[in-house]
Image: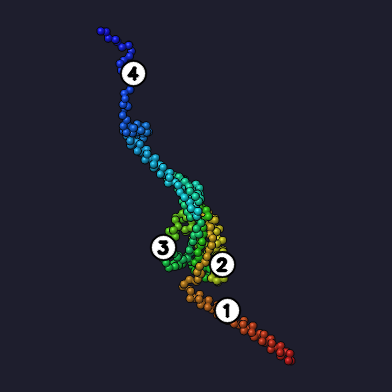
Amino acid sequence: MSVKSEPSGIRQDDVYRPPTSDPPEVSLEDVLERVRAAMPRIPGIGGGGLSVAVFVLIAVVILLWLASGVFTVSPNQQAALRMFGKFDSIATEGLHWYWPAPIGTRNVVVVTETRRLELGFRSGTEGITALQIVPVESQMITGDDNIVDVQAVVQYVIVDLAYFLFNVDDPGEPIRGVLPGEPDGRTLRDVTESALRQVVGSRKIDDVLTTEKEQVQTEVLFLMKGMLNQYETGIDVREVLLQNVNPPTEVQDAFDDVVRAREDRDRLINLAQAYEAEQIPKANGSAARIIEAA
């Protein structure tokens, strides 16, 4: 019996064999391993599974960070936008997106509300129901060297949010809810007091107490507008209202005596003028009759 030899150059392992009926089994671990192998690896972190988890976590954090930049501005508000602390732009009413912190910062402020400043007194403060007088603000010297106690209310609005937030460095007034850096704190109070003292110091005490209160309010308003515009505070004063205008308590009795004396003087003058108006026609009539008889 002779044995046929295989052709030279062809091995038995290289001979084609038909596929078996059962395909190779693929497990879940094999699929995950292939996915992990395809994912980029982060330097310094070992293990494909940990790399995937960290990558997903970073992606979620970035998405949440970007989503935090969405904000809404109400019709009565404006938002000052800053990038790396520097003022960028103003956002008005509507839905907006801006870079979240630490890249971007936004300050949303109510700008249409009429705000109020009290000079010479305090009312409505937290825990205080009674009116508090502040003599260091209210006591002033008039043009005729009298002392008068003047209390005023200033009503104002914000007209330029960028100027209001970033142009004036102010210590603020926590009791009124005014934050440091906003010029309607100490700055507005000093401007009000300065303008009021200037106007009161140029007038007589009677003008301030009685006859010319309207003119005093108008002049104070004009002076305040000029100073606030010069400082570029972003504030517009709408109205100045004088409240109680009285002499100081220490001289109230003396002032009342002077007022009563003036009232008595005016009363006597009026009586004399009435008597004159009554007697002169009688005297003229008597004189006419005598002359006619003569």
Along the horizontal axis of the image, is 231 left or right of 128? right
Q: Quadrant of the C terminus?
A: bottom right
Q: CA distance from mark 3 to mark 4?
A: 95 Å
Q: Amino acid at mark 3?
A: Glu
Q: Mark 1 sits on what residue? A: 266
Q: Mark 4 sits on what residue? A: 16
Q: Is residue 261 above or below residue 2?
A: below
Q: Is residue 252 above or below residue 235?
A: below
Q: Position of residue 212 (x, y in %)?
A: 57, 69
What residue is shown at x 31% (from left), y 25% (from top)? 21
Q: CA distance from mark 1 to mark 2?
A: 24 Å
Of the image marks 1 and 2, the number of the one nearer the N terminus: 2
Q: Quadrant of the N terminus?
A: top left
Q: Are marks 3 and 1 in contact (CB under 8 Å)?
A: no
Q: Which mark is residue 33?
A: none
Q: Amino acid at mark 4?
A: Tyr
Q: Is residue 115 visible?
A: yes
Please state the total of marks drawn on the protein image: 4
Q: CA distance from mark 3 to mark 1?
A: 47 Å
Q: Mark 3 sits on what residue? A: 126
Q: Amino acid at mark 2?
A: Glu
Q: Are marks 3 and 2 in contact (CB under 8 Å)?
A: no
Q: Is residue 168 visible?
A: no
Q: Secondary structure at mark 1?
A: helix
Of the image marks 3 and 4, the number of the one nearer the N terminus: 4
Q: Mark 2 sits on what residue? A: 214
Q: Residue furthest top?
A: 1
Q: Amino acid at mark 1?
A: Asp
